[in-house]
Each structure stands twice: as structure tokens, then as C-alpha cells.
Amino acid sequence: MKILVTGGAGFIGSALVRFLIEETDAVVVNVDALTYAAAPGALAAVEGDRRYRLEKANICDGSALRRIFTAHAPDAVVHLAAESHVDRSIDGPAAFVQTNVLGTCTLLEAALE
Ligand SMILES: NC(=O)c1ccc[n+]([C@@H]2O[C@H](COP(=O)([O-])OP(=O)(O)OC[C@H]3O[C@@H](n4cnc5c(N)ncnc54)[C@H](O)[C@@H]3O)[C@@H](O)[C@H]2O)c1
């Protein structure tokens, strides 16, 4: 099974990616923009695994998502890419709407296609 995980370099996503690679036979495609919130070091244990692939992309970028879906044809998607730091939403709410609402919609449309 091939699973596309968005936000796989984040707190929750990196734990899921490690679990999928270390405890299952799944192939994992990690779609992450590697923002300030990413912790790439949390993926060190899986980086060299032939079943793991990082696609650095923004979920708001529809053409990038369509390329990734076409290239990898995943069986399932786990969507964890998000602006998650609530304190930042007070100073800059637009980024939250962009990623959490529009980005999620863009991802859903790419998956539907
Ligand atoms: N951390 C928790 O305790 C917790 C609890 C309940 C629910 N959640 C939810 O789980 C999800 C993930 O939370 P987290 O704590 O892992 O977040 P996080 O901030 O640690 O990680 C988010 C990841 O998403 C990536 N990202 C952000 N914007 C992106 C974009 N536009 N395109 C592609 N990648 C992007 C970042 O680079 C980062 O790697 C969120 O929806 C959060 O609300 C988290």
C-alpha cells in the first residue's frame, strides 16, 4: 500500500511516517513544504529507506499536487500539513486560512482528480 502523508515532517506527521516505515510494509510519500514548523531531524531514521520519499511542496500549489499524485498514485492520503501554532494565528490569521482551508481544498481536488 502506498500512503501519501502531508505534513510528514511535523510533530504528528513525523511520528506517523516513522511508524509506517518501521512497523508496516507501506510505501510512504511525504508531502511537506518544510516550513518553520518542520522538524526534518525527526525523520533521520527513515530517510535512507527505499520505501520513503520526500516531496517538498506546498499543499496550496495545485499543479505540484497533481504532479505528485500522478507520479506516485497513492492508495490513501493522511492530511496533517497545517498551520498548527495557535498563538501565531492571532498575529497572522491569513496564513491559517491559506493552508488549513484553501490548501485542504486544493489537496482534496487533486485527490479527487
Ligand atoms: N500536535 C498535537 O498535539 C495535535 C493534537 C491534535 C490535532 N493536531 C492536528 O494535527 C495536525 C498536525 O499537527 P502537528 O502538531 O504535527 O503540526 P506541526 O506544526 O508540528 O507540523 C505541520 C507540518 O505541516 C507542514 N506544512 C505547513 N504548512 C504547509 C503547507 N502549506 N504545505 C505543505 N506542508 C505544510 C510544516 O512544514 C510541518 O512539517 C494539525 O492539523 C493539528 O491541528 C495536532
Image (cartoon, grey):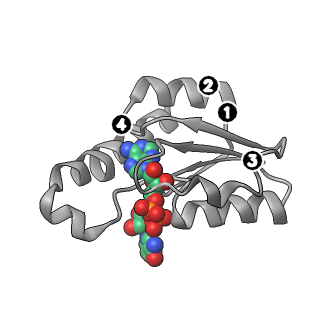
Q: Identify the residue under disc 3.
A: 47
State the separation of the CA atoms marked 2 and 1: 6 Å
Separation (CA) of disc 2 from disc 4: 17 Å
Amino acid type, mark 4: Cys
Question: Viewed as shown, does residue 28 lie left or right of 78?
Answer: right
Q: Residue at x 75, y 60 (%)?
A: 20
Residue 33 on image: x %, y %: 46, 41
The answer to whether the residue bearing label 4 lies less than 8 angstroms from the nearest atom of ligand 1 is yes
Q: Can you tell which of label 3 and label 4 is closer to the viewer?
A: 3
Residue located beneath label 4 in the image = 60
Q: Residue furthest bottom?
A: 87
**What residue sits right under mark 1 in the picture?**
73
| Crowd around label 4: few <14 · some 14–19 · many ≥20 (10 Å) | some
Question: Count the marks: how many?
Answer: 4
Instruction: Report the side of 18 relative to 34 (left or right).
Output: right
Residue 70 circle label: 2
The reply to whether discs 2 and 4 touch (Cβ–Cβ < 8 Å) is no
Q: Which tag, 2 or 4, sits closer to the chain's start?
A: 4
Q: Residues within 10 Å of mark 2 (few under 14, many from 20)?
A: few
* Residue at the extreme left: 91
Vertical placement of residue 24 versus 99, above or below: below
Q: Is residue 51 above or below residue 96?
A: above
Which residue is rendered at x = 47% and y = 33% of the image? 110
Residues at marks 1 and 3, CA–CA distance in whole angstroms: 21 Å
Q: Are marks 2 and 1 in contact (CB under 8 Å)?
A: yes
Q: Earlier in the sequence, mark 3 or mark 2?
A: 3
